């Protein structure tokens, strides 16, 4: 099957204080049609650089090597139309002085060739799809009037407004509390299936990734450590670093540190 | 049985915002024993950070009492309050925002010693060296700027700074939430070691039940300004009684080990 996005020996570097910094090196992977691929890594792993590179959002001064191909598309992908991007902080990705309706309608108008009236109608449908309470009156609300979780729903509505083939969520739930995080993850899952989108889910949380992704790619220091089906990564990782990430996860089923410490005292 | 280190009873706090009144704390009562970790968990806006700020007297409650080391903490002011504050320290989520990024590590650790008049100028370098040692940092870091060191090192500096005044209680507000998972484990182990060595109590505020279950003795779950459930951490997480406790447990990401 043709992949939706195909990365071949992708490298990204930029100059910082006169020295060349390599953010990504020799990354080859594919994002399959309709799949949910998670990118896992710690600070400095290059996971966000990867998302920005695919979305064409890196600054012009960045040096990019290798190829990013969209075989199904047959043209250069357009941000907003072919790629929807959801950032970590919806407060800074939404425009504070435009109403919710205006900013979603703008995407629909720009990419779908609708007129304003149709675009507003489309915006209302989208707010309904992301389960925002009372979509009709939310259209005229401003971002600051909504809670963090509601703002992220609006950002998602905007990202999917033009029916993109790929949705990129870059730490999209990291600033939310766990209950709202679970709701947003459920929403993303639902939309991916409904629209047949592929999902690139960037996260530092391997447990969260295991709940959402078909495959997981582990990144460290700008390199791809390993990529495999979620089940294989979680149950039988081949790389020591992946094992380390799994061990560092503090689930509700592991031995508490406190108990270990107190057991140590007794012996 | 010794008296608890801190007793908060009947705390109330309302904020008015744009004509609307928000009840941030609604009859909040709890105790923390010496050398004990009490975790405060709850969704955003449940009042966790307001509790922390009230305990530190960064905001004053509308009603209620706080007794710290047997004394009425809310009645203290001036020199007495400053002395009390030395015993009650805070570590924030983002030490880069909490410190002057251009200050050196030594300067950050010197401040509390100077402000609380804990040592004269000649003795401070030695104390700073020992603080760095206690949090597992190399003495070579002392002249580095806060913005030059890693996030994990910075959080160790924040803990060292809190330790400088020999606190009986440390308030840790999402103190490990911004750290990489590999660093997080090391910082939690450091906190447990310090607690064992110096009998420090922690008020550990977090939305991460996995972390809370791992290091806290007791947990209090907050929702809409109220403590809705409290008990031993392992028990509450294994068998939550409140609706919000159940929701928090259900929402915690779990490593899926499908067969």
Image (cartoon, helix red, strand yellow):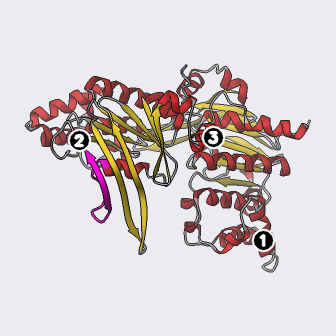
Residues drawn in magenta: A54-69
Give the letter of the chain under mark 3. A
Give the letter of the chain under mark 2. A
Q: Secondary structure at mark 1?
A: loop
Residue at label 1? B117
Residue in the picture at 59% in, 45% down: B181
The residue carrying pointer 2 sits among few (fewer than 14), some (14 to 19) or many (20 or more) residues within 10 Å by Cα, namely: some
Residue at label 2? A70
Q: From the viewer's perspective, is the residue at label 3 or at label 2 nearer?
A: 2
Percent across and percent down for residue B138 are 72, 66
Percent across and percent down for residue A78 are 19, 45
Percent across and percent down for residue A45 are 48, 52
User: Left or right: where does residue A260 sit relative to residue A137?
Assistant: right
Q: Is residue A219 visible?
A: yes
Quarter of the image for residue A169 reads top left
Q: Are marks 2 and 1 on the same chain?
A: no
* Numbered label tally: 3
Q: Secondary structure at mark 2?
A: loop
């Amino acid at each position: 099957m043709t992949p939706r996005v195909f990365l071949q020996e992708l490298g990204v570097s930029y100059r910082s204080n006169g020295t060349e910094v390599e953010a990504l090196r020799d990354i080859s992977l594919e994002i399959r049609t309709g799949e949910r691929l998670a990118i896992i890594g710690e600070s400095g792993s290059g996971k966000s650089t990867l998302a920005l590179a695919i979305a064409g959002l890196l600054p012009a001064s960045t040096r990019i090597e290798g190829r990013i191909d969209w075989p199904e598309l047959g043209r250069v992908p357009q941000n907003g139309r072919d790629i929807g991007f959801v950032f970590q902080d919806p407060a800074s990705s939404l425009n504070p002085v435009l109403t919710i309706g205006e900013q979603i309608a703008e995407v629909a108008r720009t990419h779908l060739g609708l007129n304003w009236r149709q675009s507003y109608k489309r915006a209302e449908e989208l707010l309904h799809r992301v389960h925002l309470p009372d979509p009709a009156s939310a259209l005229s609300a401003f971002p600051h009037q909504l809670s963090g979780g509601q703002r992220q729903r609006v950002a998602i509505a905007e990202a999917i407004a033009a029916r993109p083939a790929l949705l990129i969520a870059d730490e999209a739930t990291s600033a939310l509390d766990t209950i709202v995080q679970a709701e947003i993850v459920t929403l993303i899952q639902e939309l991916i299936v409904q629209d047949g989108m592929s999902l690139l889910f960037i996260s530092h949380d391997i447990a969260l990734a295991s709940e959402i992704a078909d495959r997981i790619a582990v990144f460290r220091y700008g390199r791809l450590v390993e990529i495999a089906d979620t089940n294989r990564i979680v149950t039988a990782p081949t790389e020591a670093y992946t094992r380390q990430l799994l061990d560092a996860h503090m689930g509700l089923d592991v031995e508490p540190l406190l108990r270990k410490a107190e057991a140590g005292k007794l012996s | 049985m010794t008296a608890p280190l801190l007793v908060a009873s009947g705390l109330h706090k309302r904020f008015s915002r744009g004509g609307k009144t928000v009840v941030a704390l609604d009859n909040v009562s709890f105790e923390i024993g010496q050398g004990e970790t009490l975790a405060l968990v709850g969704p955003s806006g449940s009042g966790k950070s307001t509790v922390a700020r009230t305990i530190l007297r960064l905001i004053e409650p509308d009603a209620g009492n706080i007794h710290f080391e047997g004394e009425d903490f809310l009645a203290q002011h001036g020199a007495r309050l400053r002395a009390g504050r030395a015993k009650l320290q805070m570590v924030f989520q983002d030490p880069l925002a909490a410190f002057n990024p251009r200050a050196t590590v030594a300067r950050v650790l010197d401040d509390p010693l100077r402000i609380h008049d804990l040592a004269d100028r000649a003795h401070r370098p030695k104390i700073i060296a020992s603080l760095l040692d206690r949090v597992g940092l190399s003495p070579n870091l002392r002249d580095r700027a806060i913005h030059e060191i890693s996030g994990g090192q910075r959080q160790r500096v924040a803990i060292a700074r809190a330790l400088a005044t020999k606190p009986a209680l440390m308030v840790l507000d999402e103190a490990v939430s911004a750290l990489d998972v590999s660093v997080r484990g090391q910082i939690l182990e450091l906190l447990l070691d310090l607690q064992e060595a110096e009998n420090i109590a922690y008020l550990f505020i977090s939305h991460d039940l996995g972390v809370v279950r791992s290091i806290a003795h007791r947990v209090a779950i907050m929702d809409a300004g109220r403590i809705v459930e409290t008990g031993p951490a392992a028990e509450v997480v294994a068998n939550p009684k409140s609706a919000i406790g159940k929701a928090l447990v259900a929402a915690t990401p779990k490593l899926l080990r499908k067969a």
